[in-house]
Amino acid sequence: MAGRAYEGDSRVPDPELAAAVQGFDKNFIYRHSPVLNRVCLAVFDERAVSPWLVDNDVIEVFKGLASTMKTLSSGIYYETLPESAIQISLFRRLKELLDGFMQPQPQGLEHSLKVSDAIDILNFLTLSATVNSNRRPRSRQYLDMLNSLAAQAAPEKRAGNLVLP
């Protein structure tokens, strides 16, 4: 990761997407942190299963899911599947996760996620992945960032006091 300091060829985000994300209020991340965390952990888990996953794959999956959710918000169920098998695997994992958040929740617990909120979350994640990646086709800069964040969030595993003969 130290070698990335010279990689100044960062991506330029889509202006419409950047403008939409700028419209979020200060509490957006706080309100949606459970979903954001779970989506990022799912991407992290998918990388462990698919080590050839790159930033472009993740960005395309976020865009495909956002497109799928936009279609769903109009009352039509149509999935905008990505092109490659790697992307489809991540798409299915994240779609299942978001569907779980959109299911009605038992009384007294959190509210279920609205489709419009899912679109906002996916737009935010798309912008985040775009800004934290670079233009290189095999870049894993965003995935490495998620990896380092997951490592920081994981509790430190301590060795037990077990003494083996």
Image (cartoon, helix red, strand yellow):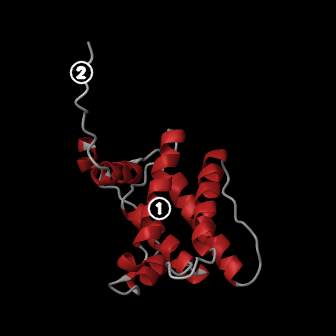
Q: Is residue 78 left or right of residue 13?
A: right
Of residues 102 and 46, the one nearer the viewer is: 102
Q: Type of residue at label 1?
A: Arg
Q: Residue at x 40, y 79 (%)?
A: 31
Measured from the top left, where is residue 85 in percent x and y? 66, 46
Of residues 85 and 111, the one nearer the viewer is: 111
Measured from the top left, where is residue 126 in percent x and y? 48, 67
Q: Residues within 10 Å of mark 1 (few under 14, many from 20)?
A: some
Q: Is residue 130 above or below residue 47?
A: below
Q: Residue at x 26, y 42 (%)?
A: 3
Of residues 127 and 118, the one nearer the viewer is: 118
Identify residue for label 1: 38
Between discs 1 and 2, the one toward the N terminus: 1
Q: Is residue 60 above or below residue 85?
A: below
Q: Is residue 127 left or right of residue 148?
A: right
User: Can residue 55 be seen in the rendering of this structure?
Assistant: no
Measured from the top left, where is residue 16 in percent x and y? 49, 80
- Local secondary structure at mark 1: helix
Q: Is residue 129 left or right of residue 122?
A: left
Measured from the top left, where is residue 124 in percent x and y? 45, 73
Residue 80 image-quadrant placement: bottom right
